[in-house]
């Protein structure tokens, strides 16, 4: 139980430090980098993608059957791979703060569903979980695409497609690594009485994390679309986030 809340707090603190986008270092590395660099970036981006990980954690929270885990993770993977590849290749984009806000809503939704919120509070049957995981997977993939499109992708169609697929492969590698850790923690926790006792509270905490992420993304959206109301313009706001990223990278490098 303590481990869960420590991890949750870490993810929220990490989200405050990172803009969950592509840093200048990422962009510079990709200019000279090959497909292996895109694989590496995809993996690290997923492992630092607190919103994606929280949703995935919610999906597998009550799943103990291997077939069910494979089924739901596969449908989520299919969903985010479709939009990641197609949206990036076709240049379809949107405000990434709004996309990430919807992704935050997916975290809230899954935690609410885990606590049987539809039945208890709304008096209706929970929507088909497979369909919802696929739908949210498509949205998560669009979020990943919006970040990938910040990079200098190849000018030729075939080279661009290879870079997109390489990034997607990296995302799946990162997801597998994260999933192994999640399932290991959940397996250990399910063997204790505290799992049954605190499962509902844990999903309330997951829902709270989703609300916090939602507020953060809406805050970012308002800053970049209504800069005159915040005392500085959009470029200055972006530079502030870049400075935060540089400071964080400097801290890591000095350790």
Image (cartoon, rainbow, N blue to C red):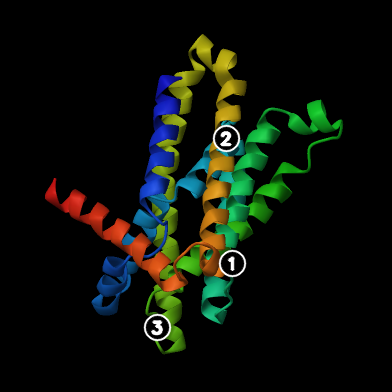
Assess whether mark 2 and mark 1 are in contact (beta carbons under 8 angstroms).
no
Residue 31 as seen in the image, left or right of residue 219: left
Which residue lies under the disc numbered 1? 83
Measuring from the top left, give residue 216's x and y in whole percent: 52, 50
Crowdedness of circle 1 by 10 Å Cα count: few (<14), some, many (20+)? many
Q: Residue furthest right?
A: 123
Assess whether mark 1 and mark 3 are in contact (beta carbons under 8 angstroms).
no
Assess whether mark 3 and mark 2 are in contact (beta carbons under 8 angstroms).
no
- The picture quadrant where one finds residue 14 is top left
Which residue lies under the disc numbered 3? 159
Q: Which of the two discs, 2 and 3, sits closer to the camera?
A: 2
54 above or below 19?
above
- At numbered mark 3, what does the secondary structure look like: helix, strand or loop? helix
Name the residue: 52% across, 74% down.
88
227 above or below 203?
below
Q: CA distance from mark 3 to mark 1?
A: 18 Å
Q: CA distance from mark 2 to mark 3?
A: 42 Å
Residue 175 as seen in the image, left or right of residue 84: left
Q: Is residue 229 visible?
A: yes
Which of marks 1 and 3 precedes in the sequence? Answer: 1
Residue 208: give its label: 2
Position of the C terminus by quadrant: top left
Work out whether residue 199 or residue 102 is closer to the camera in this orientation and state it.
Answer: 102
Q: Which of the two discs, 1 and 2, sits closer to the camera?
A: 2
Name the residue: 60% across, 35% down.
207
Q: Is residue 80 visible?
A: no
Q: Residue furthest bottom?
A: 156
Residue 54: give its label: none
Q: CA distance from mark 1 to mark 2?
A: 27 Å
């Amino acid at each position: 139980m303590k481990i869960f809340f420590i991890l949750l707090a870490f993810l929220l603190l990490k989200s405050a430090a990172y803009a969950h986008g592509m840093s200048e270092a990422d962009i510079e590395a990709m200019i000279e980098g090959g497909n292996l660099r895109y694989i590496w970036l995809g993996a690290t981006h997923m492992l630092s993608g607190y919103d994606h990980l929280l949703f995935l954690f919610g999906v597998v929270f009550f799943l103990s059957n291997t077939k069910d885990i494979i089924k739901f993770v596969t449908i989520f993977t299919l969903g985010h791979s479709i939009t990641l590849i197609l949206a990036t290749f076709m240049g379809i984009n949107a405000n990434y703060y709004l996309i990430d806000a919807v992704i935050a809503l997916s975290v809230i939704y899954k935690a609410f569903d885990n606590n049987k919120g539809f039945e208890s509070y709304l008096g209706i049957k929970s929507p088909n979980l497979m369909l919802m995981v696929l739908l949210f997977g498509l949205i998560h993939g669009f979020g990943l695409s919006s970040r990938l499109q910040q990079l200098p992708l190849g000018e030729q169609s075939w080279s661009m497609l290879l870079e997109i697929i390489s990034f997607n492969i990296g995302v799946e590698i990162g997801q597998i690594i994260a999933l192994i850790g999640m399932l290991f923690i959940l397996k250990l926790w399910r063997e204790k009485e505290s799992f049954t006792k605190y499962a509902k509270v844990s999903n309330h905490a997951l829902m709270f994390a989703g609300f916090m992420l939602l507020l953060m993304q809406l805050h970012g959206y308002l800053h970049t679309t209504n800069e005159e109301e915040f005392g500085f313009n959009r470029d200055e706001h972006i530079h502030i986030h870049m400075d935060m990223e540089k400071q964080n990278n400097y801290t890591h490098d000095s350790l």
